Amino acid sequence: MVEHVKKVSLIFFFAGLGGLLRQLVVLQFGDIGLLGCNYVAVYGLVYSTHHLFHSKSISPSLKVGLSVGFFGGLSTIAPIFMALATALEQGDWWRLIGLMVCHILGGYLVALLANSRALKREEG
């Protein structure tokens, strides 16, 4: 029970940090900031899942807090949908298409890059 409360508390704490960081970056840089946050979150989650989270020195509660909380808070999908909806409402088709391609295809490519880097680190 104590471990469960610890995990949930860390998820909330790190989600708050990730969400706050994302909001500050988006306020400063707009769509590019949102895209950057998502790329950092995807890379961080994929890389840490392969490499960092295999470490026995990191507690399971901290692993869950960082992966679900921080990276989840940093990359939450609601702001992406808001950006897409705004572009759609404004009839800005190029922005809409660009956002969709960058977030979906770009996120996939970033995940592949992180996976490749993590696997190389494990081999070397």
Image: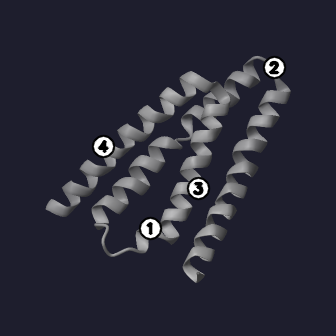
Work out whether 73 lies above or below 86: below
Q: Which numbered disc, 2 or 4, marks the residue that appears first in the sequence?
A: 4
Q: Nearer the viewer, mark 1 or mark 4?
A: 1
Q: Nearer the viewer, mark 4 or mark 3?
A: 3
Residue type highlighted by circle 3: Tyr
Structural distance between the alpha carbons of marks 2 and 3:
31 Å
Residue type highlighted by circle 4: Phe
Residue type highlighted by circle 2: Gly
Which residue corresponds to mark 2?
91
Instruction: Say if residue 1 shows up in the picture.
Output: no
**Identity of the residue furthest to the front in this view:** 124
Label 3, secondary structure: give it.
helix
Structural distance between the alpha carbons of marks 2 and 1:
43 Å
Q: Nearer the viewer, mark 2 or mark 4?
A: 4
Label 1, secondary structure: give it.
helix
Q: Is residue 98 left or right of residue 30?
A: right
Structural distance between the alpha carbons of marks 1 and 4:
20 Å
Q: Residue at x 73, y 49 (%)?
A: 106
Quarter holding the C terminus is bottom right
Label 2, secondary structure: give it.
loop
Q: Is residue 110 left or right of residue 15?
A: right
Q: Which numbered disc, 2 or 1, marks the residue that appears first in the sequence?
A: 1
Label 4, secondary structure: give it.
helix
Which residue corresponds to mark 1?
52
Q: Quadrant of residue 116?
A: bottom right
